[in-house]
Image (tube, helix red, strand yellow):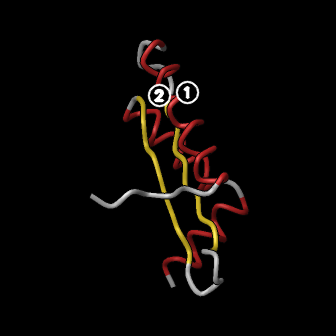
């Protein structure tokens, strides 16, 4: 089995997602979190990504809509769709 050596950044993202998952489990379905993280690899020729979606599905949709309503979110999504 291959072991995954996370950078400090990715380790912190994983730890944050774990804390949020615990919080969400106690929140009676009132919260959602979407995490998208990326960093360049050691040699700068590629990158590593991770992502999490957790919580109430309706709240996840609200979060995505909120992102799309922000100017930075619209520009990001527009760039992805082109």
Q: CA distance from mark 1 to mark 2?
A: 5 Å
Point out residue 62 in the picture as x, y percentages from the top left corner.
51, 39
- Whether the residues at callouts 1 and 2 have beta carbons within 8 Å, the answer is yes
Secondary structure beneath dot 2 equals helix
Position of residue 46 measured from the top left corner of the image (x, y, whole percent) = 55, 82
Q: Residue 19 shows which numbered tag?
A: 1
Identity of the residue drawn at 55% across and 48% down: 35
Residue that appears at 66% across and 52% down: 8
Residue at horizontal 52 percent and vertical 77 percent from the top: 80
Q: Image quarter for residue 63?
A: top right
* 44 in relation to 66, above or below: below
| Depth check, front residue: 9 or 77 | 9
Q: Nearer the viewer, residue 11 or 58?
A: 11
Q: Left or right: where does residue 3 sit relative to residue 46?
A: left
Residue 21 bears which disc, if any? 2
Mark 2, Cα crowd under 10 Å, few <14 / some 14-19 / many 20+, is: some
């Amino acid at each position: 089995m291959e072991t995954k050596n996370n950078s400090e950044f990715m380790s912190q993202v994983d730890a944050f997602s774990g804390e949020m998952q615990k919080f969400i489990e106690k929140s009676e379905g009132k919260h959602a979190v979407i995490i998208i993280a990326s960093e360049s690899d050691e040699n700068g020729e590629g990158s590593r990504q991770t992502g999490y979606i957790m919580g109430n599905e309706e709240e996840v949709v609200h979060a995505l809509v909120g992102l799309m309503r922000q100017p930075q979110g619209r520009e990001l999504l527009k760039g992805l769709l082109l």
